[in-house]
Image (tube, helix red, strand yellow):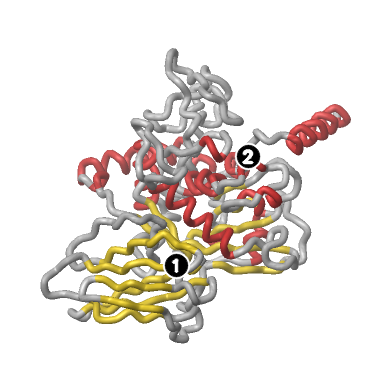
Amino acid sequence: MIFLFSAILYFSQIQLAFSQEFRHCGTPYLHQDTTSKLFSPGGRIFEKWLARIERNEVARINENDDSIYTIPVVVHVLHKGEPIGAGANITDARVMSQINILNQDYGKFPGTPGNNNNPVGVDTRIRFCLASNDPQGNPSTGIVRVNTFREDFQFGTDNIAIKNFSHWDSSRYLNIWVVDLAGNQYIGYAQYPSIEPSWSDLYPFTGSIPDINLDGIVIRHNVFGNVPPSQSGVFPAYNKGRTATHEIGHYFGLLHTWGDGFGCDDPNGTDYCDDTPKQGTNTSGCPSSSMSCISGTKAMIENYLDYTNDACMNTFSADQKKRMRIVIRNSKSRKSIPIKDTSCVVVPDTSKPIPAKKGELVFRQIAPSASNSSFIIELEPRDTIFINSVEVYDMVGRPVNVLLSKDEKKVYLNYTYIPIGVYPCIIRASDGKIWRRKIIRR
């Protein structure tokens, strides 16, 4: 029996190593044997809690709150001493590309791979940016590099070890660990959100919730961000950054679209989202279509919570959006994250201005070229208010000279000649209002 199991495991690993159409998320396996399973997404108590919150929010009309939730992110790059750009020690540019991908996907940005024409596909109104300050308030790029002197990490057994190398307060930041995971099976996993263990007297909580101080997601280094073909290894189908999109969906309470069930007849195979057709199993590769468990209805293979290739993913549904936002507002381990932190702002990669209220700022990116990298900072028209000044600093607080030209309503900022990096800036208006933003020079 031991020999048979070993042989099956061995040949399974061979198949995985040579497959380019296999995505394996470790999130369900991380939680399946924990005593807190009932209190995590898919668990009976969690789902009863979420349904009750949804009913209460409908009654209070909070459900219709569609404001932008901006999530401050810290990326911990765990490597074994390689130079930056080699192995797990990925470049800042790769990290920044992943943040852009997250915003395209969660924002359904037009003209990007995150856009879609699915009737239920939505902009989740969730955004991400690298944290401007560390937990002590010091300026930061939101990227932390740690030489672990380890070749790789095992899924599951090394979870705590990974996070003990470096982590920031999970009640204030989304922690992402980029690592070299051993083997060719798992490419990422997330910590599910948790709820108060005392919520239900019917199902008393007898165990401990997984350590929320080490909360976040773990991603294999060669599927993080826009991955050059030479660095994707045996995972070329997952080189467009959608593993992080998928795992962050779990972090905000989403389940796989097939509900981790076992066929169409499994009553537990649900993701609790009515607008994602029930599936009997996951979808691999990039098929032109695949049928759901509902006669005549196609599976939503383009959904970020399926297992299709990165190039085929482009959809969050309306019910998934609602579920994530309820979790962000109410879950014990999510509601403390400062989702409206004005020091953490996304400067979008788009030539179209973003609508703003009067007296608010609009950032409009100018398409960069070899000789020009710039954008416009524009104050939404108001007769008596105009921009007084824009101050740009490096990450240690020293003033940085950039080319500025401005009129009363717009500042044209050219950062062609400053080094690649993240630069905090302060914008002052004539009425005394101050905005703190950051410029990312790629």
Q: Marks 2 and 1, Cα distance to the nearest angstrom?
A: 31 Å
Image x and y of residue 313, in percent:
50, 37
Q: Quadrant of residue 82?
A: bottom right
Going 49% across and 73% down the picture, which residue do you hit?
A: 134
Image x and y of residue 10, in percent:
82, 34
What's the residue type where badge 2 is placed?
A: Ala
Image x and y of residue 255, in percent:
49, 37
Front-lying residue, 113 or 47: 113
- Report if residue 202 is visible in the image: no
Going 49% across and 71% down the picture, which residue do you hit?
A: 422
Front-lying residue, 231 or 27: 231
Q: Residue under label 2, please give it.
A: 237
Q: Quadrant of residue 376?
A: bottom left
What's the residue type where badge 1 is placed?
A: Ser
Q: Secondary structure at mark 2?
A: helix
Give above or below for 354 relative to 140.
above
Give above or below for 321 relative to 214.
above
Q: Residue under label 1, please give it.
A: 373
Image x and y of residue 175, in percent:
53, 60
Front-lying residue, 85 or 52: 85
**Horizontal arrangement in the rendering, residue 208 relative to residue 332 (left or right):** right
Q: Are marks 2 and 1 in contact (CB under 8 Å)?
A: no
**Mark 2 or mark 1, whichever is nearer to me:** 1
**Horizontal arrangement in the rendering, residue 296 relative to residue 64 (left or right):** right
**Horizontal arrangement in the rendering, residue 71 relative to residue 54 (left or right):** right
Residue 240, which numbered label?
none
How many numbered discs, if any? 2
- Outermost residue, left side: 383
